[in-house]
Amino acid sequence: MLTGRVDNFANSHLTGWAFNKEAPGEHVIIRVNFGTQIVATGIANILRPDLPKSGIGAGDHAFRIELPSNITSVNGLMVIAQSQKHGEIALPIATNDDRTLDALFNSFTKRYDSALILLKQEMDGIKERMEERGPTSDHAEMPDLPDDLAQRLIRLENRMESAEVFFVRIDEMMRQLVVEKKKRRKRFLGIF
């Protein structure tokens, strides 16, 4: 199954990604049409570090295609991802709302990942100190632990639960956006 998206159009270049889930090693051909005329082509084979994190192969499925200088917007463009074995699809072009949502999600993910790294480092440090002391049943000989460790663990658990709720809400919002977009596309094409 082919999937992908045009992420941006700036400085006469279209950027995005395209991926064939049935053939993850394939680099699909990108064709840009303006009306019935092909105005540019390229291959989705550029490495982009965020793609594997999103389950998009090894990450080498991005594209950057230069368009003729007379094309100044995405209006009238149709971007096609074409597989040699599995057909072709028209790629959706990201809206400003899509890009804003992407930026917010990426910002949240970076902050969440950083907090988890810091927590792991702190827990590893505590574990090392406890291993250095060896087994003990005397609480007086416990290694130097933060006085507020129990409260910090409770706060962390609450934050993780909040993050899980946040991700569930984001997933639901994304599903609703996809459904609405499909409805609009069907109305635009005259399919009810």
Image (cartoon, rainbow, N blue to C red):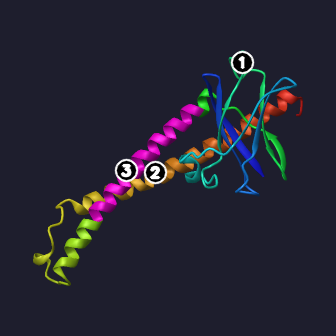
User: Could you give the CA–CA distance between mark 1 and mark 2, rounded to whole angstroms?
Assistant: 42 Å
Which one is in front in this view, the residue at disc 1 or the one at disc 3? Answer: 1
Which one is in front in this view, the residue at disc 2 or the one at disc 3? Answer: 3
Q: At 70% across and 56% down in the image, what residue appears? A: 25
Residue type, label 2? Ala
Q: Is residue 46 above or below residue 35?
A: below
Query: Sequence-wise, which precedes: disc 2 or disc 3?
Result: 3
Does residue 110 belong to the magenta stretch?
yes
Q: At 55% across and 38% down in the image, what residue appears? A: 102
Give neighbour class at mark 2: few <14, some 14-19, many 20+ (Cα, 10 Å). some
Please state the extent of the stretch shown in magenta in the rendering: 99-123
Label number found at residue 151: none
Query: Sequence-wise, which precedes: disc 1 or disc 3?
Result: 1
Give neighbour class at mark 1: few <14, some 14-19, many 20+ (Cα, 10 Å). some
Work out which residue is located at the far left of the displayed protein and give it: 140
Q: Which residue is mark 1?
A: 71
Q: Nearer the viewer, residue 43 or 122?
A: 43
Q: Which residue is mark 3?
A: 114
Residue type, label 1? Ile
**Rendered location of residue 167, percent (x, y):** 53, 49
Magenta region, mostly helix, strand or loop? helix
User: Could you give the CA–CA distance between mark 1 and mark 3, rounded to whole angstroms?
Assistant: 41 Å
Q: At 41% across and 49% down in the image, what residue appears? A: 112
Q: Is residue 188 above or below residue 22?
A: above
Q: Which residue is mark 2?
A: 163
Give neighbour class at mark 3: few <14, some 14-19, many 20+ (Cα, 10 Å). few
Report whether 141 appears left or right of 63. left
Query: Sequence-wise, which precedes: disc 1 or disc 2?
Result: 1
Report whether 16 appears left or right of 149. right
Q: Secondary structure at mark 2?
A: helix
